[in-house]
Image (tube, rainbow, N blue to C red):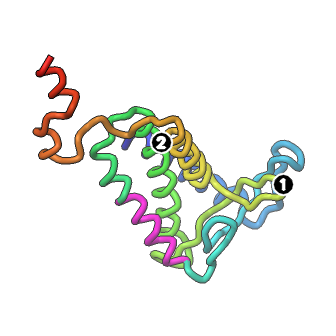
Amino acid sequence: MALIAAAVITVDQITKLWALQTLVGQPSIEVIGEWLKFTFARNPGGAFSIGTQFTWLFTFVALGVVLAILFFSRRVTSTWWLIALGVLMGGALGNLMDRMLQPPGIGVGHVVDFIQLPNWPIFNIADMAVVGSSCAIVVLSLLGVEPSTQPESAAEASEPSSDDEVAVQS
């Protein structure tokens, strides 16, 4: 999971560095006509630039998401869940890094966005990772893929299940 998160962070930060060096103060670059453009933007808010006056709150939310993933992932044994959580953590950390390191300052930095589709807000690789992994988590849940086969506590591990009791009685 950590390797997947690191890969997402690396791609996100390299592409944001490219955007900072190439796109700032420049007109949009058409990649696929009007369908896909690279357009530089700094986003102080959340998705769809919501809450631009609460930049600090998004810093804490991203930190909370990362801490929750770290706590939850200790019990995860499903490869698919670990992949989805790794991508989610990488996306959250990618944007958290912007909040901590980009202007105007620590904890209130604006996220670097540069990917533009028609009729959609400008976004970045970290945003794609968060949305994609969230969709994967919903699909895994709907398909009934359990995140873990491990018991949640040592007490549960020592208690025989009803299946074990049936097997002993047979």
Q: Report x, y in % for residue 97.
A: 47, 62
Quick one: 53 or 107, which is closer to the camera? Answer: 53
Q: Is residue 25 left or right of residue 87?
A: right
Tell whether position 64 is magenta. yes
Q: Picture coordinates of residue 69 (x, y %)?
A: 38, 53
Residue in the picture at 35% in, 60% down: 67
State the residue in front, 140 or 105: 140
Q: Which residue is mark 1?
A: 118
Q: Nearer the viewer, mark 2 or mark 1?
A: 2
| Relative height, residue 74 to residue 56 (above, below) | above
* Residue bearing mark 2: 84
Q: Amino acid at mark 1?
A: Pro
The numbered mark at residue 57 is none
For the magenta stretch, what is the residue range? 55-67
Residue 54 colored magenta? no
- Name the amino acid type tagged 2: Ala
Give the secondary structure at mark 1. Answer: loop
Given the current orientation, which residue lies at the most extreme right position? Answer: 33
Q: Is residue 31 left or right of residue 107?
A: right
From what the image shows, is residue 27 above or below residue 139? below
User: Dot 2, crowdedness within 10 Å: few (<14), some or many (≥20)?
Assistant: many
Q: Residue at x 62, y 77 (%)?
A: 51
User: In the picture, residue 21 is in which quadrant?
Assistant: bottom right
Mark 1 surroundings: few (<14), some (14-19) or many (≥20) residues within 10 A: few
Q: Residue at x 69, y 66 (%)?
A: 48
Upstream in sequence: badge 2 or badge 1: 2
Check the picture and name the quadrant holding the C terminus: top left
Q: Nearer the viewer, residue 157 or 69?
A: 157
Magenta highlight: main SS? helix
Residue, far bottom: 53
Helix, strand or loop under label 2: helix
